[in-house]
Amino acid sequence: MKSDSGDNQIQQRWARVRGYLRRECGDAAFRSWLKPLTLVGMRGSELRMAVPTRFMRDWVATHYGVRLLELWQIETKDILTVEVIVDPGRSEHSSADATGGDATRPAEPAPVPPVSPSEPGRAGSDLVLSGLDARCTFDNFVVGKPNEFAYAAAQRVSEAGAVPFNPLFLYGGVGLGKTHLMHAIAWAIRRRAPDRRVIYLSAERFTVLFVRAIKEKDVMAFKDVFRNVDVLMVDDLQFIVGKESTQEEFFHTFNALVDQGRQVVLSADRSPSDLEGIEERLKSRLAWGLVADIHPTTYELRLGILQSKAEQAKFEVPPKVLEFLADKITSNVRELEGALVRLAHDLQFVGGVITLETAQEILHDLLRASDRRVTIEEIQKRVAEHYNIKLSDMHSARRARAVARPRQVAMYLSKQLTSRSLPEIGRKFGRDHTTVMHAVKKVEELTSIDNGFAEDLDLLRRMLEG
Amino acid sequence: MSAAPELQLVIDLPHRTAASREDFLVAACNRAAVAWIDRWPDWPQPALGVHGPAGCGKTHLARVWQARAGAVQVDANDVGAAAVAGARHVLIDFDADATLPRSAERGLLHLYNRLREERGHLLLCHREAPARWPTELPDLASRLSAMPAAAIADPDDSLLAAVLVKQFADRQVAVAADLIEFLVRHMERSFVAARTLVAALDNAALSRRRPVTIPLAREVLAAIAGERQA
């Protein structure tokens, strides 16, 4: 059992957490979503909090769950998880007695009519924040020919007090920056007009929430949230295809917002007319506003992106490596940036400087479709060619240095590049495993004293692996 | 068994594998993967791929991370359910030759997106680097290609020796240093071969009631080589 002072302490902590949340999220969001949160109590390392409806629980858990836990953990390290449960019996008024004895009372599962937060119609404000990537701003977006139109349109939307075009429909292939632009719009609106209520979410999440709302007979609250925003942004609209009732609901939401002069921003991997499986009437409305496409990147844009990202990360990469990446990784920006991140981190682990060779090695899975498994026969053939000796000399009894050295090199490479046992390698050279071990030792000695030999060996290895 | 009545029947009792971070053998071939796991939660992206040949220690590393992150392991076939809601950190550790089913591609994409939004993490362990998975869904393919991937390569001699010692220790079999040296010189030099060999040696020693020695090892290696040729 907790003592009274324990209860007091946790209440004080909750008061502080609430204070932070109010400041961080703004009054409107706080009133809608966080004020109704009540403290249930601790159960082991789990802190339980309650909200009156399931729909609210989902919103709070999705959008504020992480932050809530972080704030609680600032207060006390004892809390490892924060669980938000549904308890229609509780309201903010009962929060005063919200600890201790009834912590184990099971949450009421029965669906309830939506309990409107204190200010009906203000729900949903600022929901956007937790899912947004802080790095995705307009400043960090590298503009070039292929994306300048979409960029300009996105900026226009974020600046406007009035709605310039509705909807803004951004489309383009994967990883070209649609989501980046949407996040940038949200950040910019938040900075310029913190009062505007913005929701950003993926079409997939829209579907999940809608299906759940239907199941839990909570559709009114769902509609309430989505039809009372100033800006609605739905990403990856192609994922709504084929989901009829979600599509229907989206259509009504969309119409309601457009009719009220609220901004809608949508993205998809193809243009509205190419979205198969979407009703014609929705298709045509999607194209009413401005449709802006993002084209595949050009070499110049890719190089510009790499230079800008490397500079931001204070990551020194030789221009030759950046040019190589811009040339090789052409599919999309996400992979391009991913490659740079991988280079930066792998180098931290292994040390050294970045060169064209290290870059190729670190990114080999990306640059090459598969790793070939080299065979001993291939090694023998390549090495014989390289040193200009006959292939048969690889297993002949001749001991002249002109053939013995290449043979040792081939044995060494067979050990390095295959997982064959030493006796097996020996057999392929008509020798036993001790000869292989001797060859390996000899080659290692030579590489440490003879730079030219070492480079030669490295060249052979690369040729065989490449 | 009738052919060799003097042999004792060996029941393959599961031995307990030491699988904490301290039990993991760090060497050149797995240093990057270990470094990635050790630096969690400081990962630049929501997901990490760890890939390498069978028996290279992917699952061991995955367990270490799972315990540290409090992650939930999800079967690739059930990834759709995990995508909608659930754990903040997720582990998908593919069995030997398993691949991501086509039907799970969408689920994995949405799981990735959810974890990115919730600042969670996903660890994918597979034979092959995620960038090389044959993926149909372009949105998923680009995420798989962009995520950091740490490769575990075939072991060098010293790691191979250490792996043998550890696997004998897991089975509580005491072996001499010269035996290990003998094995490293004569066996196929891969993780999976080490595992097969130690199991075969342990079985042979138990069934013949003989200690694990070089002569026994020679017999077992010959038998394994014979099986491979057959």
Image (tube, coloured by chain):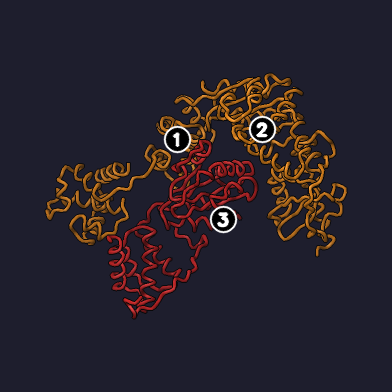
Q: Do callouts 3 and 2 point to residues on the same chain?
A: no
Chain A pictured colour: orange
Q: Do callouts 3 and 1 point to residues on the same chain?
A: no
Q: In red, which chain?
A: B
Above-or-below relation of B53 to A283: below
Q: Amino acid at mark 2?
A: Gln
- The chain under label 3 reads B
Single out the mark in the foreground, 3 or 2.
2
Q: Give how far apart the Cα atoms at labels 3 and 1 are.
A: 34 Å
Q: Amino acid at mark 3?
A: Gln
Q: Give how far apart the Cα atoms at labels 2 and 1 are.
A: 47 Å
**Residue under label 1:** A317
Disc 3 secondary structure class: helix
Q: Earlier in the sequence, mark 2 or mark 1?
A: 2
| Quadrant of the frame with the N terminus of chain A | bottom right
- The chain under label 1 reads A
Q: Amino acid at mark 1?
A: Val
Q: Quadrant of residue B119?
A: top right
Please indicate, yes or no, whether residue A390 appears anywhere in the rendered image. yes
> Total marks drawn?
3
Disc 2 secondary structure class: helix
Residue drawn at point x = 58 percent, y = 58 percent: B67
Any mark on residue A424, and which? Answer: none
**Residue under label 3:** B66
Residue B223 percent coordinates (x, y): 29, 67
Q: Are marks 2 and 1 in contact (CB under 8 Å)?
A: no
Residue drawn at point x = 81 percent, y = 42 percent: A114
Residue drawn at point x = 57 percent, y = 47 percent: B42
Please indicate, yes or no, whether residue B32 appears anywhere in the rendered image. no
